[in-house]
Amino acid sequence: MDWKFLQGLLSGVNKYSTAFGRIWLSVVFVFRVLVFVVAAERVWSDDQGNFDCNTRQPGCTNICYDHFFPISHIRLWALQLIFVTCPSFMVVLHVAYREERERKYRAKHGENTRLYDNPGQKHGGLWWTYLMSLFIKTTFEITFLYLLHYVYDSFRLPRKVQCDVSPCPNLVDCYIARPTEKTIFTYFMVGASVLCVVLNICEIFYLIATRMVNLRHRGSIRTSSRKIHPGLDYDGCKSSLPS
């Protein structure tokens, strides 16, 4: 998988992120993508080849491996990284849509006119898009953590598992290669995922709090404007209502 391509796309998201969003992006690259590419893939590279069962029955080892590992940790984490990073592209696409509207508006009304003060500023529809992307990312993170725990019944890999699935002749013992090392990496990846969830929740509260402060400030300006100019609204235009 070309993680450099994903990194290039996410780098554009960094321009429109808050401080929490930039920390989240750093955690994703350093503690998840980098660890995944450099170390985790190698740890699980020979998991099926070194999965050993004390039987010579043809097909028993493969069936037992599929029974206990219906989906590889590596593939599950790869899907998780893709799903939790893709919602960020919603913000980039929304900003690109605003920039295109700005270009058409200037072409029609002149270069000195502006439709947006800053196309990347998080207000209006872009604010909702950004907030929605955070909720989607958080939902994906929690869903994949639940799937990992549900599929393997724990984040800890046992040294020995027992299998009696056909065509195994009876209850056989199977041994997982390097279970301690794999357990350490599993806990590390789970911890990084939980940290990303915490950062997303903090950013959600930050966005909502900032929006409430801005709305209150805007309401104060409107009230002050009406007190000073009873016949004008807060934008300085004549009010249609009688004074």
Image (cartoon, rainbow, N blue to C red):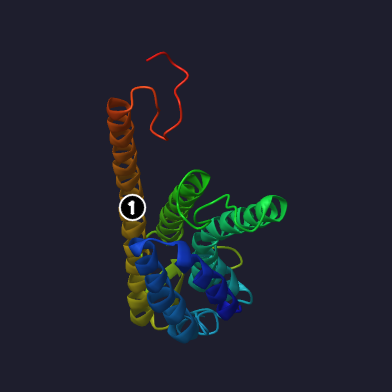
The residue lying at 61 percent from left, 59 percent from top is 96
In this orientation, does residue 227 appear?
Answer: yes
Asked if 135 appears above or below 33 in the picture, the reply is above
Residue that sits furthest to the right in the current view: 108
In this orientation, does residue 72 appear?
Answer: no
Quadrant of the frame with the C terminus? top left
Between residues 193 and 63, which one lies in front from this camera angle? 193
> Neighbour class for label 1 at 10 Å: few (<14), some, many (≥20)?
some
Residue 12 shown left or right of residue 185 in the figure: right
Q: Check disc 1 and report the residue beneath it.
A: 201
The residue lying at 37 percent from left, 56 percent from top is 200
Asked if 220 appears above or below 75 in the picture, the reply is above
Q: Amino acid at mark 1?
A: Ile
Between residues 55 and 33, which one lies in front from this camera angle? 33
Quadrant of the frame with the N terminus? bottom right
Rendered image quadrant of residue 86: bottom right
Residue 201 percent location from the top left of the image: 33, 52
Residue 26 percent location from the top left of the image: 39, 73
Give SS at disc 1: helix
Residue 148 shown left or right of residue 66 in the figure: left
How many dots with numbers? 1
Residue 77 percent location from the top left of the image: 49, 68
Between residues 136 and 176, which one lies in front from this camera angle? 136
Residue 152 shown left or right of residue 219 in the figure: right
Residue that sits furthest to the top in the current view: 242
Residue 192 percent location from the top left of the image: 35, 68
